[in-house]
Amino acid sequence: MGLIVSAASLPGGEPPGQDRWGTTSRSVVVLDGATSYSPEAPPADEYVDVLLEALLRRVDDGDLREQLRAALAETVERLGLTPGAAPSSTVLILRAGDELVEVAALGDSTAVIGLQDDTAARVSDDRLDDIAVERRVAYRRALEHGEGYGEAHRTRLRELQRSERPLRNRVGGYWIAEAEPAAAYELVIRTFPRSTVRWAVLTSDGVQKHLDRLDAWSSAASLGDGGLGRLVRDAQTWETEADPDGRRLPRSKRHDDKTIVVWRDGSTGE
């Protein structure tokens, strides 16, 4: 059973950015590489390239946790990575079979699944939200008060990342794709009977924030490539023109990378 997907991706800064996505005959994978705000957190560009390729070769068959573990192990070996000093990325997977649709998340990327009864299920991994809560609240409050994206903001983000790092891939902390393959066993997985699923929208958080702001998940699910491209461009334009300092929608940077992939059971027009 082949996939029917539409997608769009827009880097927040210089291309190609650190979001990646890809498909196989049964699966969709979305990666969102973490932005580095300090020397201890290296950029994720090469990391997401290697991890995506390794995961797409494996993801169609077998246990999703085991396949992600193997892809992480290959990435660590190929790039010579050390836990705690490596790039990191969220992982979002949809795998559609004849009977089941599996959706898995590691990190704060989000999928929303539209069901036949007109309800929707949200799949994400929110454990990072519980880490360094005071620092997270502080930078968002400063943006709401008009501080903007200057040096004080960047300092807050560097301190936030330094607070998060000791709890990365640790019990009681949070889990992310980095240089510890065992993190794969912490995938958040939900399974849906195939007959109950109408569509699925998979996003990096640069798009998720806007779909939540607009309550637009179901409308996004009806769009083709062109419509999704307009959606991400409109989101970026809104950030530039309506909220350049992050007061209305507090976020770590003015423009994050934006990736959205839509899976559905049949072709739809734009």
Image (cartoon, helix red, strand yellow):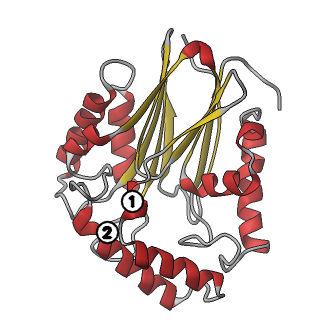
Q: Residue at x 57, y 63 (%)?
A: 256
Task: Give the quadrant of residue 185.
Answer: top left
Q: Dividing the image into 4 quarters, which one contains the C terminus?
A: top right
In what element is the residue under mark 1?
helix
The quadrant in which the N terminus is found is: top right
Q: Residues within 10 Å of mark 2 (few under 14, many from 20)?
A: some
Q: Is residue 192 above or below residue 211?
A: above
CA separation, marks 1 and 2? 8 Å
Q: Give amino acid for label 2.
A: Glu
Identify the residue at image location x=42%, y=78%: 134
The residue that label 1 is drawn on is 128
Would you say 237 lies left or right of 84 here?
right
> In the image, is residue 118 above or below residue 207?
above
Percent position (x, y) of residue 190?
Answer: 45, 30
Image check: 259 left or right of 77? Answer: right
* Residue in the picture at 77% in, 66% down: 238
**In the picture provided, is 129 more to the left or to the right than 230?**
left
- Secondary element under disc 2, as helix, strand or loop, is helix
Task: Name the amino acid type tagged 1.
Answer: Leu
The residue singled out by tag 2 in the image is 164
Residue 215 x %, y %: 74, 49
Give the mark nearer the N terminus: 1 vs 2.
1
The answer to whether mark 1 and mark 2 are in CB contact below 8 A is yes
Q: Nearer the viewer, residue 56 or 118?
A: 118
User: Which residue is more in the foreground, 150 or 105?
Assistant: 105
Give coordinates of residue 234: x percent, y percent: 77, 57
Q: Of residues 88 and 121, which is closer to you in this image?
A: 121
- Compared to residue 64, the image places residue 207 above or below, namely below
**Image quadrant where residue 188 sits:** top left
Left or right of 9, for residue 105: left
